[in-house]
Amino acid sequence: MGAAAMALALVAAGCGGGSGGPGGGGDDTTLTLWHMEQPPHRVEAWQKIIDDYNATDPEFPVEQQVQDWNQIYSKIAGAVQSQTQPDILFTIPDFTTYVRPLGAVQPVTDVVEELDSEHGFLEAATAPYRDDDEYWAVPLYGMVQMLWYRKDLLEKAGVTEAPQTWEELRAAAEAGTADGQSGIALPAGKNLATDQVIYSFLLTNGAGQFFTEDGEVDFDKPEVVETFEFYDQLMDYSPKDSANYSWGEPQAAFNSGAATMAVEKGQYLMPFEEESGRPAADLGCEFIPQPAEGGQPGSIFYSNAAMVMSQDEERAEGAEAFLSYLLESDTYGDFLNAEPGLFLPLTEDGKTAESWTSHEVISTYRECVDKMLEQSETGALFGFVDGQYVDKIGNVSGQNILAQVIQRITVEGEDPADAVAWGEEQMKAAVEE
Amino acid sequence: VTRDAALPTVDAGGADTAQMERRVPGVARPPLPRRGRARREKLFGIALVSPLVLIMLVIIAFPLANTVLLSLRNQGVIASPSAFVGFDTYRKVLGDPALWEAFGRSGIWLAGNLVVQTILAFVTALLLQRAGRWSRAARTWVLLPWVIPTVAVAVIWQWMTNSNYGIVTKALGLVGIDGVQFFADPTWALPTLIVMNSWHWFPLGAVIIYGALQTIPEEVYEAAAVDGANAWTTFWHITMPLLQPVLFALGLVGSLWSFNIVDSIYLVTRGGPAGSSTTAPVQIYDTAFKAFRASEAAAASVAAIVLLGILAWLYIRFAKPEEA
C-alpha cells in the first residue's frame, strides 16, 4: 500500500543506518567523505585528489561516497541515529541548519580561523556557517548566478549592449523573442532552481532579507511584490512550458538557440561550445540586472562547505587535515576544476592559484569568470543575510516557497500581492514548526 | 506402515498429516494418544508458519506500529527530539484542506490509471492473441515500456512534450494545435501524468490478461460459434466472465500499486504546477522530507492506510466475482 510504503520510508529514515562511514567511531582508519556532486567527471576529478592525498601516507586516508541531494536529508538522520555518519559531509548553509540539531556536527572554528589567516576567506564564504560563536563548516567553493546571453542572437535582434537594468532586460527579452525563439528562459517549476533565480532578482531590488532582526518572517513587502511582478512579466518571453522548468531546460534552450538569455550559475561555461556549435565568443555574461531606481548589485551566492562529523578527536583532526589539504594552492585549483566555472574559489590566494587559472575553460572565459568573482562579493543567501543565522531556514527553502509563489502568479493568475501574502503565511508556518 | 498412515484421519490438517506420514514408510512408531497427536500437529504447524510471521512482524508490523507511535508525537526533523501530543497531530493534519485536496487528486489518479491501463492492457492482450507473425513479435516488444526505468520514462516524456523541441508538441503544431503545455498547465499536468504512467505500466496488465485468455478453452468459443454467437456476444458472455477473477485481482493490486506512486510524479512535476499534481503520497513525502514535519507525515500516512483499507474492503465486498 502506498501509505504503508511511505510509513516504511519514514521509519527507515528514522531508524536505518547509512551504508556510510564510521564517523560515529570504530576501528577503521579510513575517513568517509559524503558529497552530493553526482556527475561522473566531478567524482573522477575528486577521486584523483583523494588518491594524491592518500599517497602522502596520512594517518587517516580518505574515501568518497557519492550521495543524492534528494535522499541525503533522510539518510543523514538515520546515519547519525545509528552512529554511522560520515567523517566529512559536504554541505550548503541551509542544509547545515538541518544537520546540526541531529547532534553530530563538530565545531571547526580553530581550523577555519587558521585557514583564513593562511588563505584569506571571503566574508560571504564563512558568515553562513557561523553561529553560537563557532564555525560549523569549512568553506570550500562558491557558486554565483549571472545573466548569460547569446551575443549572436541578441545582435541579430538589434540589441548591442548587455542589459544592465530591469527595463533593459525586459526590452532585450522582448526583442529576442521571435518565431521559435524565446527572449529568455527562466525556470518556474516547483524547485530550487526557480527559488534561486527569483532570489537573485529579489536581492537586486533590496528585498533579499526575509526576516527581521528578531528572526520574525518579513516577506510581505512592496519590494518583494514588485520583484514577483517583474518576474511574471519576464515569463511572457520565456518558453510556454517554463512552469515545469528546473536547471536543465533553460540551459538546453539557451545552448540550442531556442532562448536568447538565461540566469544561472557558471555551469554554462564548459559545455557551451560543444552544445551550441558556436564559438566561445558568442557567450556573453553580465551582472544580474537591477532596477534603474533604487536597485543594487546582488545575486544568490552559495558557499559550499564541509562539516566534520567524526566523534573521535583524532579522526576529526584527520578530517580537518584533509580539508586543509584541499585549500592548498597546488590542490585547490584541481579541486575547483572538477566543474570549472561553476565551482569558484573562496579564498584570496585561490583566485590567483595557477592550478585553477590554467584550466582551459577558466582561461577561455576569463572575462566572465572575473565577473562571477566580482558578483560573488555582492552575493547573499536567504536566511543568512547581514550575518543573520535563521535556524529553520531549511524548512523554508525545502518547501520551495518562492517557486510556489511565482507559480500561483503565472499559472493560476493570482494577484502578486495576494500570492506574496500567501508566501509569508507559508514561511511563518514553516519557521514556527 | 502405521495404522495412521494406512487410514488417513480427516480432522484438522488431517489430509496433510496423512500425506506427510505416508512419506516415511517402514518406520514403526507407537500410536500417540489423540490429544498428544493433535498438540504435536499444532506445534508443527506453528513452527512452519513462524518464520513468515516473524518476517511480517519485522518488515510490516514494526514499521507500521512505529509510524502510529510517531503520529502521536510532534516530531519535526526525523529522529529529532519530540513530545507525546496524543491526537493533536491528527487534528492538525486532518483539518488541513490541502490533505483532502491531495486525496481527491489521488482518487482521480487512481481512477484514471485504472481506466486507461485496463483499456490499453485489454486491447493489447486481445491483439496479441491474434494469430500471425506481427502478434508473435509484439508479444516481446510490448514489454518495452514496462522495462524502461521510471527515471528514463520521465525524461522521455519531458523531451517529447518540451515546447522547444518536443516531438509531440511539434506534431500537434503541424495539425494546428499550438500551445498545449502538458506538464506546465494545471489542466493538463495530472491527465498527462496518468497517460505517462499508464504507458509505463500497461504491458504488465496486458501480459497477465493475455495469459488468462490463453486458459479459456477453444471449445467454448467453438460451441458459441455453433450456437450462432457473434464476436460481441462471445466477448461479453464468454471472454469477460471467464476473465473476471483475473481482472478482479489485477484491479485490486493495480489500484493499490497506482496509489503508491510518487517517483513518476515527482520526477516530472514535483506535484506542480501550483499543486495540480500533488497526490496524497506526494503531499506526505513533501511533509516529511521537504517541510520536515515527520509526525504530520506519519499521521497522514496512517489516515491513508485506513482510507485504502476501507476502499480495498469495499472493492472486495462488491466487486469480487461469484464462485463458479
Image: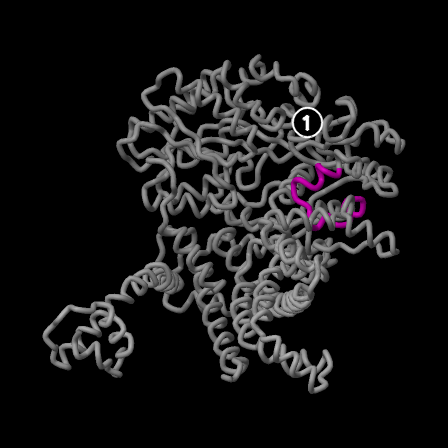
Q: Is residue A226 left or right of residue A119?
A: right
Q: Is residue A224 left or right of residue B266?
A: right
Q: Is residue A117 above or below residue B118?
A: above
In the image, the segment drawn in magenta is: A234-253
Q: Residues within 10 Å of mark 1 (few under 14, many from 20)?
A: many
Q: Is residue A11 above or below residue B243?
A: above
The residue that appears at 72% across and 42% down in the rendered structure is: A186
Say which quarter of the image contains residue B10: bottom left
Image location of residue B8, percent across then percent down: 24, 80
Which residue has dot 1 on it? Answer: A269
Label 1 SS: loop
The residue that appears at 76% across and 26% down in the rendered structure is: A284
What chain does mark 1 sit on?
A
Q: Is residue A59 left or right of residue B185?
A: left
Q: Is residue B111 above or below residue A301?
A: below
Give the color scheme: rainbow, by chain, secondary structure or one colour.
one colour
Q: Is residue B13 left or right of residue A341?
A: left
Residue A247, magenta (yes or no):
yes
The residue that appears at 71% across and 61% down in the rendered structure is: B132
Residue A104 makes an appearance in the image? yes
Image location of residue B284, percent across then percent down: 51, 59
Say which quarter of the image contains residue A172: top right
Image location of residue B120, percent across then percent down: 67, 65
Image location of residue B260, percent across then percent down: 52, 61
Say which quarter of the image contains residue B88: bottom left
